[in-house]
Image (cartoon, coloured by chain):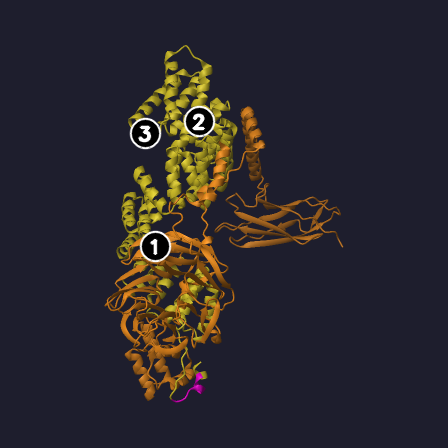
Amino acid sequence: MDKQSIAEEKKSPKSQAIVYDSDWLNAYYDPVAGTNSHSGSIELADIQADGDNKLVTANYSNVKSELKLKVFKGASLIKENNLVDVPTAIISFYMDNLNPRVPAIGVASGSCIFAYKNLKPSFQFTLPQVDVSGVEKDIWAKAKEGTVDVSTMQETLEDIRRDGQITLSNRSLLLLGLNNEEARRFIDVFKNVEPKKQVNITCLAKINKNSSDEDAINCLVVGTELKNIYIIDTEAFTILATMECPHVPVFLNAAGLFDVEYRIIAACRDGCLYTFKRGFKAPKVSIPLGSQIVGIEKSGKNVIVACMDRFVNCFTTKGKKIWKLEMPADIITTSSFEIKSKGIQGYIVSLTNNEVHIYNEKNVLSKFKTQDAVVGIKFGKFGREDSNLVMTTRNGGLIIKILKRTAELSVKDAHRGPPEAQLKKLDVPKKTKLYVDQTTRERENGTLMHQTFQKDLYKFRIKAAKEFLRSLQTSSTPISTNPNEPLKINAQIQGIGPTFKLIVKVHNISNNQPCLNLFMTFIYDEKLYRISKSFIELPILVPGIEYPFSTFVHAVSNQLISDNIKVLLCKKNANVPIITAIISMPISEAEI
Amino acid sequence: MASKNDSTSTAEKIPKLPSLESLNWLLHLFYIRKDFKACKDLIKEQVTLTNGNSEYALYVHALIMRQEGRIQESLELFQSCSVINPANVLNLKQVARSLFLLGRHKASIDVFNEALKKAPSDWEIKHNIGICFWHLKQNEKAKQYFKEAINLSKSEISFLMMAKVFIQENNADAAIEILVKAAEYNPESCEILTTLGLLYMKQRHFQKSFEALGNALTYNPTYYKSIMAVCNMIQIHNDHDVALNKYRIAADTAPESPRLWNNIGMCFFGKKKFVAAISCLKRATYLSPFEWKILYNLGLVHLAMQQYASAFRYLNSAVNFRPKEPLIYSLIAVALTHLEDSVNAKQAYEHSLALDGENVYTNLNFAVFLYNQGDRQGAVSRLIEFRKNFDSIIQGKRKDIDPELQDVVSKLGPILNLGETPRPKSIEQKQEKIANDSAQKYSNITKPTDDSEENYRRESTIASVSNVGFDGSSRSETPRTESRVSTANLMRRDFEN
């Protein structure tokens, strides 16, 4: 019976364990590819219209010369473009109706979008600067006329800032941080130009303009630091629509047709999701998450939101929570995937434990470990192969995996058996022979054991009680129990011998009662020690102050033995000490 | 910076200003990845570049500081953020939150109120003010703010906090009401369902409780709290194997929970695997040495193992922590009977009945004990008492009555009434049997209710346990031995001196 159950337990984990690794071919891994890109700055697109999809990455770096747009064909780098500024995001889009259909790559950095076509820069679009408020403008106008001095200007600007109604332009904010002389020169340089607010792009997305074909003309959706979302026509590069977000958008997800109906979901820095629809400037729905958002993906009609608290949440577009799922580690980034030929779609999450999980709704389809933490993921057609997973790692590495054509990516634990932990055996120790012997002994002699134990326990208690009583009667405790003489004693010994210094601190712990007529003396073995002052008369002890008294102790014996010295604090004319401190002396060093 | 640019600028061309926010997106990206090192490097860069004017860099820096536990420094950074941009509600919220984390609830409320002026419909602010009031023990105000927060957002945590306040006020009905509503809006929340299940359990709506807890487990089969509660109910129905299976999951997530090992031990006990039960219980008592329930269970299992001396020791410790628990005295009586200390056994029985005179097991055990001692009169009166209580239990249709109880009664009854034909030997055996069986039943009656309470009082257990531990190390000894009583008195007298 037992054997059977053990055999079953051994078998069951094997049959239940699901092997995921076999779904993917490891196509390429370069730990130093120099691709410092996040999920938003990786694109797979057929940028040369030869049916062979290229990988485009925009790289972030501290060093300006390393800010690059890289194009890979297969595993080899075929083109590098230097970038003027740190790339925020890139996106491939169709900007014209020409044939063959060649998508452009849009690189957003700062307030500009640079469009690259056929691997060459072709167009630069700068978001229009925003006017500053009237008050601020007036001040700079006055500065231009020279009718305002530096300190008044700074004061006025400071007032505006403190008021909190208007956000100042960069220029004014910088001015506030300068001292008088610097500020004067600063104003001289800038006063001739009208102050404007620069618009910084934070994220990019695209929707189709008027046709749902895959290669139809796109509109760009741009989120900015000034809490606006713009929709930009890519043929003429004009702003088609502007939306106002309650907070700075960090991720955008857009779907639909601009001319018909569309929905934009923006994840913002305040940890909320906002949904915009065609024709509305303000968000229709807001969904608070309670944690910062790491990524948003669409899954059918629902929104999947990955958060910093390790949870992946699913909401309807109306904001009703459908489910949430906890990841085993912190989430770094997310991406969506769709394999049309198999009719599968879902999302991919990368975790800090170097794992990448592929999910459909709440079910794991596949997962694997990577060599480094993955910070950027893109799934799509690469080269001529349809289902590739391109990943960039934290240290700039590049991993490419190809989905095997035989891989099913089906829900493998659909029957939802018991969780893995249920198969683990409980850690219960086995009974030992000693234990069994002792048990038998107790069973046979239980009564006797009990009686002996009880008897000894009583003896022990009586002994303890007697000792306690004795110590109270002889006042051999360091704290006085006599309410008339509330004293505390604390003795310490200094030195290594043969001469020691004995310091006794006496503390009157009463609130208002001074102690009079006290003296201190010692009990010690005269064969071993000699104490220079064996009688110390104490002055009046005022409450709350600690009085130190000291004397020298000489070890007179040559033998390496030590003994206790008792310090007695007594009242004159009394025959019992008030308190006693026992000092165990250290072994004295020999005299040199 | 500007002065540097001076020389390069021509009359028409003005120099490009360093942008205060052009890399905010990157900061945010590093932050959400929890790549704090990269974050800090970038922050340093940004702060020097912008002369400390970069609001968002400071903000993220403060957030990181907080996560690293440097709350005071984080508070200062948040404060400088709100100086740079007082219009940003987030800054104020974070300042308030830092104050809250530092335990300055009143100051926190003030700042939150300031923030509320700017964002009057922010549920999070209202929720947090509620929590502050809750910590300040102003439950009415707290509830009002939670209610407002719920109206605005239907957020899970506000519901849970509201329920918590009600539970603290012992208003289980209101708590259930709020949680039912919460479950409507958050259908998959394990925490809501589990809290609800436990509340139902406390109200003795076992069907509803089981439903709620079962739901919680379907959404998250590894949720420790609900496993404990569900298994508890399974254990009541003596389905020990199922419970053990589930406990394995819990043991994986919380291997150091004394409650868990106690329950596992009692599962083994139910399966009559006494040695395993003892080792689990010993682990439990190692993890939580002041918990009288574990000690009680250990005593019980040792009784079943016929290790009466050990049983007595454990029960003795249990009674020190819990001097007014009649069940412990009842078991002590059984142990003492076997240790041939009938004087103290009798005293223990009497003490147990003085605390709870209606317990059928104690009454019957006492009756058998008295009969074996030759006190026929006493035995008869105990038996009458037993019958009275037993009938009322039968009428109450409680099913947790051991069938053997009746069996023993049907044997003992005739002997007492028939009179002069005693068969002492067989009775003695029976008595042993009664003791064991009834002891076992104790476990089944007491243990589950204890656990549900415990699950429920999770936070407060430590405090309450230590309270129990404090009182009565001398008082609890009174019923057992006269000599001990005298030592206790002696000691007390000494103290008075």
Q: Are the residues flagged by discs 2 and 3 from a single subunit?
A: yes
Q: Which residue is mark 3?
A: B398
Residue found at the far top of this picture: B420
Q: Alpha-carbon neighbours of circle 1 within 10 Å: few (<14), some, or many (≥20)?
A: many
Is residue B458 something one can see in this rendering?
no
Label whose residue precedes the other's in the sequence (2 or 1): 1
Dot in front, 2 or 3: 3
- Asked if marks 2 and 3 touch (Cβ < 8 Å), the reply is no
The answer to whether residue A264 is above or below residue B142 is below
Residue A68 forms part of the magenta stretch: no
- Disc 1 marks which amino acid? Ile
The front one of B410 and A511 is: B410
Q: CA distance from mark 2 to mark 1?
A: 48 Å
- Disc 2 marks which amino acid? Ala
Q: What's the chain of the residue with tag 2?
A: B
Rendered shade, chain A: orange
The answer to whether residue A42 is above or below residue B210 is below
Label whose residue precedes the other's in the sequence (2 or 3): 2
Q: Which residue is mark 2?
A: B348
- Which range is magenta? B5-11
Rendered shade, chain B: yellow
Q: Which mark is residue B131?
A: 1
Left or right of A472, for residue A391? left
Is residue B89 something one can see in this rendering?
yes
Q: Secondary structure at mark 2?
A: helix
- Tell me where residue A38 appears, x and y as whole percent: 42, 66
- Tell me where residue B364 appears, x and y as whole percent: 39, 22
- Tell me where residue A189 appears, x and y as whole percent: 39, 86
Q: CA distance from mark 2 to mark 3?
A: 27 Å
- Disc 3 marks which amino acid? Arg
